Image (tube, grey):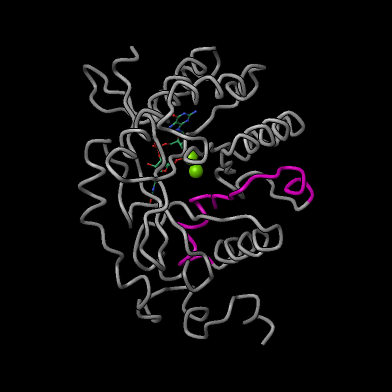
Amino acid sequence: MQKEFCLYYQPKVNLKSGNIIGMEALLRWRHPEQGLREPLDFLHLAEDSNLIVDVGNWVLDEAMSQISKWHEAGFDWRVSVNIAARQLQRHDFVSNIQALLARHPGAPAYRLELEILESTALEDMDHVRSIILACQEMGITISLDDFGSGYSSLAYLRHLPVNNLKIDQSFVRDMLDDEEDCALVEGILQMARIFKRDVIAEGMETAAHGALLLKLGCDSAQGYGIARPMPAENVLDWAVQFKPDPAWQDYPAALIGWGRATAESGKTQSELSLD
Ligand code: C2E
Ligand code: MG
Ligand code: MG
């Protein structure tokens, strides 16, 4: 069955500089009859058994091979891999990553990023914290995925020394029309600043989303408005032709929707509400 799995990659970009900062590896199943299947369709079937651990190890191995190939082609992107809860609970998780890194000398630890769902991290904070620290010690970057979808409290962020927060795409998608989602995005950005964490927005679907993210001070993003996930063999062609959309910098403020007041004034919503 593993021969039917493959990885798609979705770019992460700095909206200000236009630099490609990395790629997220996303699992796909090339089903012989049903065609390309996305993880939410099938991953739950594996999640309750150790199959998810085998699949997860295959994904890590494949992503590290890809990091080496891109390095040979002159592209030193950091590649992120999603880690399932059951995979993280394994007592040999850290030693397994060490062994994989040793097998892939072209994929040094600093080019590898692990994405842990916020909900997974909350399940067993002490264990997850020790894994985060051990991985960071090796040079691996750690992100909290779908951040804000659990219950983001200042207290627990203190105990999870992750490098990066990935703002949940549901807030980003609706922030143009929904005042509260926009406020949530702003709140997470402030929280990231206070705790000195990097932050990236996922689900940036349009240039208007990109423009509002930049106005709010979020420079990094991932989403269909930049590129959809694509097979590995398409990535280099995409990267060579990629140019940042000038609209991210110059989007007419009047078209940004709810974020309009924010965009026109150059102030954050919380500053506006103080006026
Ligand atoms: P995720 O890690 O939060 O990944 C982002 C998902 O959002 C991807 O869906 C991606 O295709 C989609 N996406 C990206 N940009 C946009 C956008 O602008 N708009 C919208 N509506 N969607 C966007 P995908 O590939 O179907 O993956 C879904 C989830 O499956 C992932 O969420 C991740 O939690 C899980 N997953 C994917 N690959 C793996 C894997 O190798 N291992 C494990 N354990 N989980 C994986
Ligand atoms: Mg992810
Ligand atoms: Mg996510």
**Residue at the image point whose x is 74% and y is 34% from the top:** 125
**Eyeballing the image, is 199 above or below 156?**
below
Residue 157 located within the stretch drawn in magenta:
yes
Quarter occupied by residue 248: bottom left
Which range of residues does the magenta coloring cover? 155-178
Does 156 sit left or right of 39 as displayed?
A: right
Look at the image and tell me in which quarter the N terminus lies: top left
Quarter occupied by residue 103: top left
Residue 263 % position (x, y): 48, 79
**Eyeballing the image, is 13 above or below 34?**
below
Count of number-bearing discs: 0
**Residue at the image point whose x is 67% and y is 30% from the top:** 131
**Residue at the image point whose x is 33% and y is 52% from the top:** 224
Residue 37 % position (x, y): 31, 27
The image quadrant in which ligand 1 is located: top left
Look at the image and tell me in which quarter the C terminus lies: bottom right
Residue 74 located within the stretch drawn in magenta:
no
**Eyeballing the image, is 25 above or below 269?**
above
Residue 70 % position (x, y): 31, 39
Does 154 sit left or right of 16 as displayed?
A: right
**Residue at the image point whose x is 20% and y is 56% from the top:** 241
Residue 27 % position (x, y): 38, 29
